[in-house]
Amino acid sequence: MRTGAIIAATLLMACQGKAPDPERDDVPTKGDILIVADQDLERIIEAERFVFESIYAEATVRVRYLPETELRQAMRSDSVRVVFSTTLPGAEEVEFFRSRNLYPDDVPVLTDAIAVIRAAGAMDEAISVADIRAALTGEGAMKVLVEDARGGIVRTVIDSVLGGQADGLRNMAVVPGLDSLI
């Protein structure tokens, strides 16, 4: 009988926990979360966020859209739990996470692409990766324009087209916004 009373008392004391903290104790369908996303993904993320919050009225998703370089810095802060990026963490970032005993999961949710727009009246012919590489390195006649030098496109072309050689990028100019490209 005495053992039963001790177990009952222990169980009752275990139920005296703190009230849930919506900033920390949330679940996928209820609560509040801050995520960080590459600014190049804003249109896609906003559409998904709208649908998610329409279905789960008790869930709030706050999104900070950042250029790729600032996104990488935010990944290292303790306040960010979810990151939407167009690239995987580099070796230095993986080492940083491991030094803190963190092992983040990489979950592909969309695929990144780079659009190539040619001037009106330009000959309609295929553009090869070699042509794009030549344009980026200044060996070709094409001009390369991007919306934001700190965005994910620059890192993608360096990693995917230039084989990681950032010093090979010699022919890229920044324009004030996406609308000025079209």
Image (tube, rainbow, N blue to C red):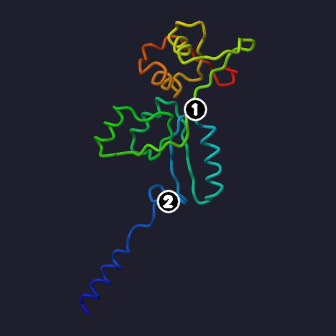
Where does residue 16 sit, x and y in percent of width and height? 38, 73
Residue 168 horizontal side relative to residue 56, left or right: left
Circle nearer the N terminus (2, 1): 2
What amino acid is labelled 2 in the image?
A: Val
Tell me residue 41's x, y (percent). Answer: 58, 36
Distance between the alpha carbons at the discs numbered 2 and 1: 27 Å
Query: Which residue is depicted at the point 68% across and 16% down?
Result: 118
Residue 178, image quadrant: top right
For label 2, count other residues whose C-alpha is less than 10 Å away and answer few (under 14), some (14-19) or many (20+): few
Which one is in front, 164 or 75?
164
Instruction: Quickly name the residue at label 2.
Output: 27
Say which quadrant the N terminus sits in: bottom left
Residue at numbered disc 1: 40
Hey, what amino acid is under mark 1?
Asp
Quadrant housing the C terminus: top right
* Vertical arrangement, residue 102 with respect to residue 18, above or below: above
